[in-house]
Amino acid sequence: MADDAEKDRSMLLQKEMIGAHYRRLELAPETREPVVYTFVPGNLTELIRSFGALPVLPEINALQSAMRGRSMPFIAAAEKAGHSEDVCSYVKCDVGMMKAGNIGPTGTRLPRPDLLLLSYTGCYTFMKWFELLREEYGCPTVFLQVPYQGDGVETREQRAFMVRQIRETLIPALEAVSGRRYDEDLLRENLARSAASEDDLVAVLQSAKGRPSPIDAYFGAVYYVGPIFSAFRGTPEGRAYYAELRREVEERAARGEGPATPAGRLDRQKHRLVVEGPPNWTHFREFWRMFADEGAVVVASTYSKVGGTYDFGFRHDPSDPLGSLADYCSGCYTNRSLPSRVAMIESYVREYGADGFLIHSVKSCNSFSAGQLTILRELERRTGAPGAFIESDLVDARYFSAANLKNRLESYFQMLDARRAGATA
Amino acid sequence: MTRAEIVDWAAEVADDLEFGAARAWLAEEPGRKAAGHLPVYAPREVIRACGMLPVGVHGAGDRLEIIRGDAFYQSYICHLPRSVVELAESRRLAFLSAMLFPATCDVIRNLSGVWQLLYPQVYVRYLDLPQVADPGAGAAFWREELAVLVRALGELSGRPATDLALREAIAAGNEARGLVRRLYALRRDRPWSVPTEELVLLMRAGETVPLEVFAAKMRAYLAAAEAEPARVRDRARVLVVGAFCEQPPLGLVKTIERAGCFIVDDDFLLGNRLLGPDVPTEGDPLDALARAFVLHAKRTSTLYEPDPAGKRVAMRERAAAARADGIIFASASFCDPALLDRPMLRAGAEAAGIPCIAFQYAENTGQFQQFREQAGTFADSIKLWGGA
Ligand code: SF4
Ligand code: SF4
């Protein structure tokens, strides 16, 4: 993968963007650029950036720490300080990192927040996470309640509630920390760039309908969604990244090539899968390899929609800035009801010609995991496609049992083989 | 009715996994309907005003063997949803025409979707409680949510709620909360007169019977408890914090008190007293309910704390109000709201010099030895060292 990855200009671009962002964050205490901590789902990056503020996304720090093998001492420190073994490991990784001096995943120091922007979107834990950080940082906290799509839709009233909060609470809070007035024209410019990047991202994700798929829509998509889920949606760098990414993927598709994986380029794709649930980060490449070694490519995933769902048509809309920010928050994957999640996965199984689907259930996350066994049964019933259920965690390596997972996956792939043989016999 | 008879009644109702009392109410008149709700808080007034019986569904405790429920939930999810699904799959909840899922945590939130998928014939609603204590936007949002509920339940029952019916339901709710407050105050002031196991049984029974029945039993119990000659005893006065959703088995409550503690305040069945002062019975009733929630809901782990100092002072204030010597953090295993809150609450308590212990339980925990030892040692240390 490393060799192939180095050839991709988009990967280099992303690496540069991230490095530059962390360096800028490290200098923020001197440059006095305001720093706003916020979460991936429901992040209002275009708005934050329109005030000249820099976003920090604690989940991204946690997962990056885990990918670099640094999460366990942080988790241990948090548990020693009284945090339960049973709660989300992202929170503990973040709290532990903070207690160890807030050295971020790239080795640079993260600045203290000037504002905690608690966009309460699709996850209960978010609320506690920022209450915990507020205890440590003592900085202002502003809360945006994003109503849950319990009936599978965003209602007019929910939208009005969000817009009102953004207007009456969030914007004044951002004005106060940045010393700048709200500039709607600037916000519109950012949103226009977001919409264009979203077009490109959707084209990339939908390229997986092709055979072979030029992308892996789960493990590979983690990289593709990185900029748009984090600090770069609506920025010129983000825009350039998505244009480049799309070009590369379209070229790869034209050449009939599969994606780069830890087991080399996956041109011969035996199994096409849809995956529900976030990945494991502590053994990311090992986990991916378990799929790639068996010729399995992921053609669609739900995790690539947690920071925004774009493939059903939503785009940020410069002509309705606050309304479209509300729509964006409401539509994030974990803010959708279980029946909507089932319908979404069902459509992926059908539209992407999947042989089966797999649920990766993580111990940390009730938002994703509670109800997944019902999702499994319902999907099997509706699609007739075979489902598999595997378990581990996000950034707590204690719950990643390689042997177990490998066994489960191997039997699953054998079952897919057997079904295929049966179908052609 | 003697006090013992009331407690026996409460135990029978609370332990009845067939919900016989609720079914009997339904059978009294053709066409009656009932609406269930999960913990913690649901606007029971709205259900009542639509002519339906509100039924709190708080899990099955240690009284039900889980056969089907475990197939719905992974081992790292709390016990409550599996026993609730077990109740439903065994058709014990089939008498409920509606099921409401309040914004307590993501497990209950997602259970609303499980219900939509498994039981499409039931009216299911996720109650998105306002998390912003803003009498403008927060109250307007919650009022609208309540209005949707009024319309939906009205259609279901065939008795759309009038303003008059809503005001009557608010008045009845005020009365019930007043009685609950009185019982809590009596236990705080004379804990030897109100064993917590009795209080818990009454609270649990109150979740599944009509308010009139609950109020009558409560009045009779209070009168009996207040009239009884006091046998003052010296025990450690403790707050039990964190058991607001999945309920601890009664054996655990008894164990704590028998180990030398008086529970003088707790979170058990918190929804029945979450709204603080009486809700006004004048003006627009939905507005009154919405504002009461937004402005006066008690601090709890399931709601956002807007006050930056709130978490630090919460335990100190509660301990002072209850004159508690110590705090027992008792959380259901895997309970996000309780467990994520605990480090903040405990730090605040300890900074104020209040001794604390913590343990985890499941609603079907059957062994109490470890709790007995922990609570006993805690009580002894409080009595010997004044909590130091
Ligand atoms: S509980 Fe899930 S959605 Fe929430 S912070 Fe943890 S991983 Fe993210
Ligand atoms: S016990 Fe805790 S985690 Fe479980 S349903 Fe209740 S509040 Fe949610």
Image (cartoon, coloured by chain):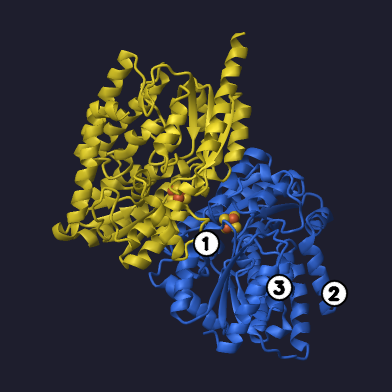
Chain A color in figure? yellow
Residue at the outermost front position: A403
Checking the image for residue B5, the label placed there is 2
Q: Amino acid at mark 3?
A: Thr
Rendered position, A182 above or below B320? above
Checking the image for residue B339, the label placed there is 1
Q: Chain of mark 3?
A: B
Label 3 residue near ligand 2, CB within 8 Å: no
Residue identifier under label 3: B255
Residue drawn at the location 50% of the way across and 76% of the way down? B315
Rendered position, B172 above or below A17? below
Q: CA distance from mark 2 to mark 1?
A: 38 Å
Q: CA distance from mark 3 to mark 2?
A: 23 Å
CB atoms of marks 3 and 2 within 8 Å = no
Q: Secondary structure at mark 2?
A: helix
Residue drawn at the location 24% of the way across and 26% of the way down? A7
- Left-right relation of A305 to B207: left
Residue drawn at the location 51% of the way across and 46% of the way down? A399
Q: Same chain for the residues at labels 3 and 1, yes or no?
A: yes
Residue at the outermost top position: A425
User: Which mark is first along the chain, 1 or 3?
Assistant: 3
